[in-house]
Image: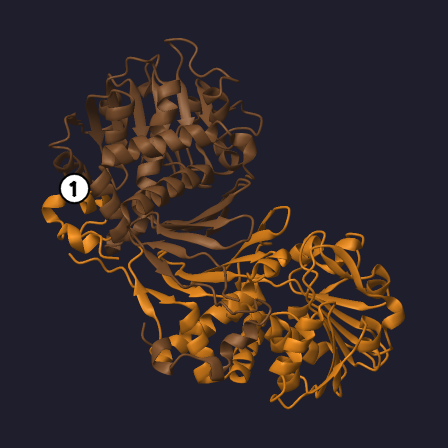
Chain colours: A orange, B brown
Amino acid sequence: MQSSLPPTLYLSADDVIGIVRRVGLPQCIAGIAERIERDFLRWQQFDKSARVACHSHDGVIELMPIADEREFAFKYVNGHPKNTREGLPTVMAFGVLADVDTGAPRLFSELTLTTAIRTAAMSAVAARKLARPECRVMALIGNGAQSEFQALAFRDLVGIHTLRVYDVDPAATAKLVANLVDERIDVIVCSSVAEAALGADIVTTVTADKANATILTADMLAPGMHINAVGGDCPGKTELHRDVLKGASVFVEYEPQTRIEGDIQQMAPDFPVTELWRVLSGEASGRTDEQQITVFDSVGFALEDYSALTFIRDTAIKLGIGATLKLIPTTADPKNLFGVLETRHAPARGDLLSA
Amino acid sequence: MQSSLPPTLYLSADDVIGIVRRVGLPQCIAGIAERIERDFLRWQQFDKSARVACHSHDGVIELMPIADEREFAFKYVNGHPKNTREGLPTVMAFGVLADVDTGAPRLFSELTLTTAIRTAAMSAVAARKLARPECRVMALIGNGAQSEFQALAFRDLVGIHTLRVYDVDPAATAKLVANLVDERIDVIVCSSVAEAALGADIVTTVTADKANATILTADMLAPGMHINAVGGDCPGKTELHRDVLKGASVFVEYEPQTRIEGDIQQMAPDFPVTELWRVLSGEASGRTDEQQITVFDSVGFALEDYSALTFIRDTAIKLGIGATLKLIPTTADPKNLFGVLETRHAPARGDLLSA
């Protein structure tokens, strides 16, 4: 009897870079946004939990599992703001899809680039429901690894044509400006958060510092603004002053996780928030008037990675990209794991050590 | 500036089979047992949590994270007893080691074979403290994928020279007998659990059914027995009758996890148990007299996988086994993730699709 174990598809960083180049970044953002919307509409079908975080002095490592009836997904992701000083990325990630029915791992993929795309897609999906319909100007605070993805997602899915950008690191801003030169979006470099927020319809904060920061204060707000708060995503890592939250309608991904990790960690446990899936499904209101200030207190939820992983997997298969991993030892009799060690049935030793 | 990201070592199933063949299975069991003892003695240095489980109708998928100051480890593992009917293993696993300081993933390895080895090593480490010193006969109930590993671990580390074996599936027992033919251990095939337990110094239960079973009942016990209960490791999956636990001194790996998953899930939340690390360190007593019945209510804890992963990693490096994965996209400027998509600096398209 031959083992019926299905193969595990492996997508390296270069494979996913190849996929995004072939398909196009705007198309990948739109494709993942579509998956996120579709999956959020079947929210009740998922077995959800707050992610498991391991905090250290300079950062955090997290595991983010989720499953529906058919597929189990998880992401490994870190957040180490100090990494960039050593030439390393702040965020590195990979993810897995497995069959719920058998537990067999079916996909092992890079998720660093993919996380940047899905985070931007998630922000745009939320803004389409929460920002005013005619938003054209966005302040972009924090011009690091995530910033270009936010810019393109809001250009294509929300209609933003002008960015007002600011970062404490001028080199990061210069990099953002250079990267957006050919991207049909006007970029205005500002010298402070307050200046960037001036006249903006939407304020997106994507800063990296692991600190209780007050990047955005209430005096910078104007009526009708939408705040897309992406960088405050960890206990002790916030971006908004309490007063910003107090005066706003606040929307979250998965409330049990955001209470611990989001900007609302500063507020009382009964501070009112609305889960975004309820707005997408029509069960709850999003923006109700032109003057309202809305906040999407985004921390990143496992369901978004499920959506991104299935998109990348399906696209890789369509394009014929990726390799196969032999991760699980197989034997003719699955109860005979010991049998894989028997040298009488073994391939030549050289084969085993070729890797 | 070149990226300073360290490589991720990949160990496939064949790589780890190759390592175990080169080093020898008994030597791997002993090596991992030594690591487990060493790591349990520094219990307080680990950031511990109960594993995260996703239960479905026929099985469970679990993530098991743990970290010390330097290394973060986690294992993905499933348990699907019905898999063997489809030619698939009940348990499949893989694991990761990462640097706590930066979050960089450093090892991605098979853990199916390795889990069988570490589980047997853990059982033997516990039995050395909890069983009577002159144990020679062990009943082995459940003769599936885990059974040969238990047999060899108890032969080498505890001094067992006779096995009394039983399984509801006679083919599994026949496989076990055939696999142990050259292993310097006497095997007596029994026709019931009660018969297997008769005259045994140690009873090891490694059954797979996801059910509240009562494999072992109080009438099968004799004074001075040690029960090594390995198969009851999930809510709704137990092996011992309550009365077996009631009359015994019960030892566990990590109490918060075992209360949910172990055979003690049947008992009141204040049913007394002792964490094994306290016995290993001398803080608590193990066996105190010849007549006492001891139970190691083993469910499998993340620290054992940490020990196994570091052993396998160090051995692979020594032997020069394994490949390198390019899992993380790297750029000269780590804040310029967007830059990996720029085609002007890109390698030829063919390179990206070669996998």
Query: Dividing the image into 4 quarters, which one contains the N terminus of chain A?
Result: bottom left
Q: Which residue is mark 1?
A: B171
Residue drawn at point x = 55 percent, y = 61 percent: A88
Residue drawn at point x = 11 percent, y = 32 percent: B182
Quadrant housing residue A132: bottom right
Q: Amino acid at mark 1?
A: Ala
Is residue B141 among what the camera can see?
Answer: no
Q: Is residue A154 left or right of residue B76?
A: right
Q: Residue furthest right?
A: A219
The answer to whether residue B216 is above or below residue A81 is: above
Q: Residue A187 appears at what percent x and percent y?
A: 71, 84
Q: Residue A218 appears at what percent x and percent y?
A: 87, 67
Front residue of this view, candidates B101 and A313 = B101
Residue drawn at point x = 61 percent, y = 59 percent: A85
Q: Residue B265 appears at what percent x and percent y?
A: 49, 34
Front residue of this view, candidates B163 and A216 = A216
Element at label 1:
helix
Tell which subunit mark 1 falls on.
B
The answer to whether residue A50 is above or below residue B260 is: below
Q: Label 1 crowding class (10 Å Cα cut-off): few <14, some 14-19, many 20+?
A: few
